[in-house]
Image (cartoon, rainbow, N blue to C red):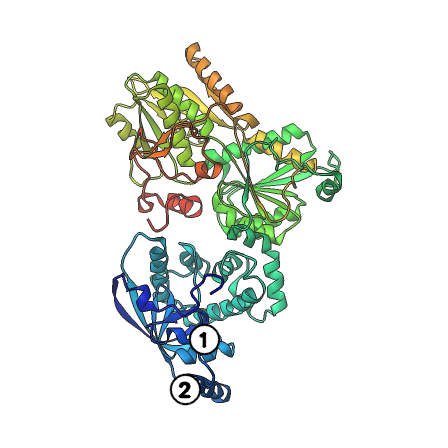
């Protein structure tokens, strides 16, 4: 009471006094965890117990005598009679058996047998409702109450890890192992870690299962499990939000290079001197063969650039077709056996296995080309391509003769929406009446060419790269001419070679450990670092070239950007008002709204191609519930 908390048991009837429910459902006789019993059903016994079910009435009262007798019975033969509870939103409220719960908690029991009646909540837009709905789907196939995730999508991730789905009942033997494994993990977590992290035991258990197989818990000692959790400590800290993600906007920013006193510096600097006799070895793991993907081909050009730049001081190897976790694991094992100290994986879909390998090989540095996938053991890197898209949008608007330009997007993933909006905002700064027609190459059956023809759009921003095996001029900013031929106008450049050069040079100089330990680090560099650029057609008039060069110069010094000042979305809502500072890195990376001059929308998950759905599942802005 002195802490300002209600000291008695919550009563479900009081909690639902102003709410309707969607009915009752008899779950039946179930063993339920005592720690998930949140209160009592009615107010009748509410003040006989503190909020942890410990008794408050005097030992000499009738209540006190019954409680003492029940305790004696518990110690002699255990409590056999089931209690009756109502379950609401994954918590239990006792209708009959409050004293049995009290005694069981007092003696340290984990669970109690209960006859459960479920009160179904009314449908709502609240996130807790969607999370509970996902739990009900899980419970239909895997009736385990103890697992209580706090993040939407976690039950589906658990199903994937267990190689199960929500359509078929899970094998009984698997449920027993899963329940027993969680109870073991929960006990250790409660005793050692619960007060140190902001995530519950279920969330931590899911992280653990990403690294260690459930079967490995059989015969595991308390000390061995504690050692494993300690090994994942930095990952748990990042996922719990206890440590922020450090987004490094430029190579000269504090946090990329080590800026510390000499004693601290010496702790993290590499003692290895690299030369042609003792070169640094780095591995690049590609999801698909180079010739099948313009994206991967760009990284391969970057790898070749590094080989030439360092002239034998750096040696690299590449592994094609690391399309599954097993293939990627074999490639990484081979790279480590070949004495590679740096390993780069170039797709967000490779993050899961990259992370597992990073824990397994703590002395090797791992990097994954992605954004907003925050992990302490794997540093991520990505280019601020939205800077180039804003300038290309301005150029497109200046060349359009009908106030219409187009944009072809790949996947609705983190960072891609910022590029779309930057293109549209850049265009609107040149032509306030311009409209941007948006289409998606990853939407099943959508003909983006037909969309552009129907809307009389001749200037289009397409893919950033030419696919090696299917060369086409429909890349960058291009114009359809009256005879249906194509003229290229401009193209953004992902200079991966420069990106890799900066990272590798910093590693060799011993300056890459500016944030050792528990922080997640993302290198998010742009034009000022030389990793993003724009190439222009020689056929452009000099005035258009001057426009681009001036915009590039202003962007590089930070005096111009699409996401500062007043911003409006498609529904004409004000994102931020006049004179506002630039949006934060997190707001730019995770934006899921479209600018007001865009004609089009974000696709739904079921509209995407299989590859599109797979990509979005890892790094998408579309909720898997949408």
Q: Nearer the viewer, residue 431 or 508?
A: 431
Which of the 4 image quadrants contains residue 189? Answer: bottom right
**Residue found 57% across the figure and 61% down from its top:** 193
Question: Does residue 27 appear left or right of residue 507 in this picture?
Answer: left
Q: Earlier in the sequence, mark 2 or mark 1?
A: 2
Report the residue marked by disc 2: 62
Whether residue 297 is visible here, answered yes or no, is yes
Question: Does residue 279 appear left or right of residue 150 in this picture?
Answer: right
CA neighbours of label 2 inside 10 A, class few (<14), some (14 to 19), many (20+)? few
**Residue found 61% across the figure and 41% down from its top:** 283
**Residue found 65% across the figure and 41% down from its top:** 513
Report the residue marked by disc 1: 111
Q: Where 477 falls versus 575 (above or below)?
A: above
Which of the 4 image quadrants contains residue 14? Answer: bottom left
Residue 247, how many percent across, how many down?
A: 54, 38
Q: Residue furthest top?
A: 542
Query: What secondary structure is marked by label 2?
Result: helix
Query: What secondary structure is marked by label 1?
Result: strand
Residue 54, how many percent across, how many down?
A: 47, 75
Q: Where 268 falls versus 400 (above or below)?
A: below
Q: Nearer the viewer, residue 357 or 67?
A: 67
Q: Where 450 falls versus 159 (above or below)?
A: above
- The mark found on residue 158 in the picture is none
- Asked if the residue under mark 1 is in contact with the one under mark 2, i.e. CB atoms within 8 Å, the reply is no
Q: Nearer the viewer, residue 9 or 25?
A: 9
Residue 541, how many percent across, how many down?
A: 41, 11
CA neighbours of label 1 inside 10 A, class few (<14), some (14 to 19), many (20+)? some
Residue 368, how many percent across, how many down?
A: 54, 42
**Residue found 61% across the figure and 64% down from its top:** 226
Whether residue 487 is visible here, answered yes or no, is no
Q: Nearer the viewer, residue 559 or 397?
A: 559
| Pair 2/1: label in front | 2
């Amino acid at each position: 009471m002195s802490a300002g908390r209600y000291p008695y048991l919550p009563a479900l009837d009081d909690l639902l006094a102003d709410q309707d429910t969607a009915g009752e459902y008899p779950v039946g006789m179930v063993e339920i965890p005592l720690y998930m019993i949140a209160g009592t059903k009615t107010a009748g016994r509410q003040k006989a117990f503190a909020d942890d079910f410990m008794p408050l009435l005097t030992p000499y009262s009738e209540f006190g005598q019954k409680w003492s007798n029940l305790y004696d019975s518990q110690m002699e033969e255990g409590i056999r009679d089931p209690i009756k509870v109502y379950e609401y939103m994954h918590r239990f409220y006792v209708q009959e058996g409050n004293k049995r719960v009290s005694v069981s908690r007092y003696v340290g029991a984990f669970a109690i047998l209960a006859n459960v009646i479920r009160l179904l909540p009314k449908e709502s837009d609240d996130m807790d409702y969607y999370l509970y709905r996902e739990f009900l789907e899980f419970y239909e196939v895997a009736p385990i109450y103890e697992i209580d995730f706090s993040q939407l999508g976690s039950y589906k991730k658990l199903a994937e890890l267990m190689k199960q789905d929500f359509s078929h009942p899970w094998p009984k033997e698997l449920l027993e192992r899963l329940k027993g494994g969680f109870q073991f993990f929960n006990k250790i977590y409660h005793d050692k870690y619960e007060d140190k992290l902001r995530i519950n035991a279920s969330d931590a258990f899911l992280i653990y299962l990403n690294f260690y197989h459930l079967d490995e818990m059989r015969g595991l000692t308390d000390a061995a499990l504690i050692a494993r959790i300690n090994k994942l400590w930095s990952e748990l800290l990042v996922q719990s939000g206890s440590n922020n993600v450090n987004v490094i906007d430029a190579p000269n920013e504090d946090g990329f290079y080590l800026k510390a006193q000499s004693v601290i510096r010496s702790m993290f600097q590499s003692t290895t001197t690299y030369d042609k006799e003792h070169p640094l070895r780095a591995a690049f793991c590609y999801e698909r063969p180079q010739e099948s993907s313009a994206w991967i081909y760009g990284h391969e050009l970057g790898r070749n650039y590094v080989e030439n730049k360092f002239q034998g001081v750096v040696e690299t190897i590449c592994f094609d077709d690391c399309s599954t976790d097993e293939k990627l694991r074999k490639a990484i094992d081979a790279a480590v056996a070949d004495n590679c100290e740096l390993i780069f994986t170039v797709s967000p879909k490779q993050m899961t296995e990259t992370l597992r390998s990073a824990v397994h090989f703590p002395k090797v540095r791992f990097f994954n080309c992605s954004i907003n996938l925050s992990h302490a053991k794997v540093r991520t890197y990505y280019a601020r391509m939205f800077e180039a898209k804003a300038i290309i949008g301005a150029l497109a608007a200046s060349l359009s003769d009908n106030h219409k330009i187009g944009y072809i997007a790949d996947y609705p993933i983190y960072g891609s929406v910022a590029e779309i909006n930057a293109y549209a905002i850049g265009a609107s700064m040149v032509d306030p009446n311009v409209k941007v027609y948006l289409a998606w190459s990853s939407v099943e059956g959508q003909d983006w060419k037909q969309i552009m023809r129907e809307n009389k759009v001749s200037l289009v921003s397409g893919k950033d790269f030419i696919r090696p095996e299917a060369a086409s001029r429909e890349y960058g900013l291009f114009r359809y001419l009256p005879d249906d031929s194509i003229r290229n106008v401009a193209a953004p450049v992902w200079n991966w070679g420069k990106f890799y050069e900066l990272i590798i040079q910093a590693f060799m100089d011993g300056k890459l450990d500016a944030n050792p330990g528990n922080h997640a680090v993302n290198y998010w560099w742009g034009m000022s670092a030389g990793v993003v650029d724009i190439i222009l057609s020689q056929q452009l008039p000099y005035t258009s070239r001057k426009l681009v060069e001036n915009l590039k110069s202003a962007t590089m010094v930070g005096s111009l950007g699409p996401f500062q000042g007043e911003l409006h979305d498609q529904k004409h809502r004000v994102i931020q008002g006049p004179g506002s500072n630039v949006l934060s890195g997190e707001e730019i990376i995770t934006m899921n709204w479209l600018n007001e001059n865009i004609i089009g929308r974000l696709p739904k998950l079921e509209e995407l191609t299989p590859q599109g759905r797979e990509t979005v599942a890892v790094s998408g802005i579309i909720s898997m519930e949408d």
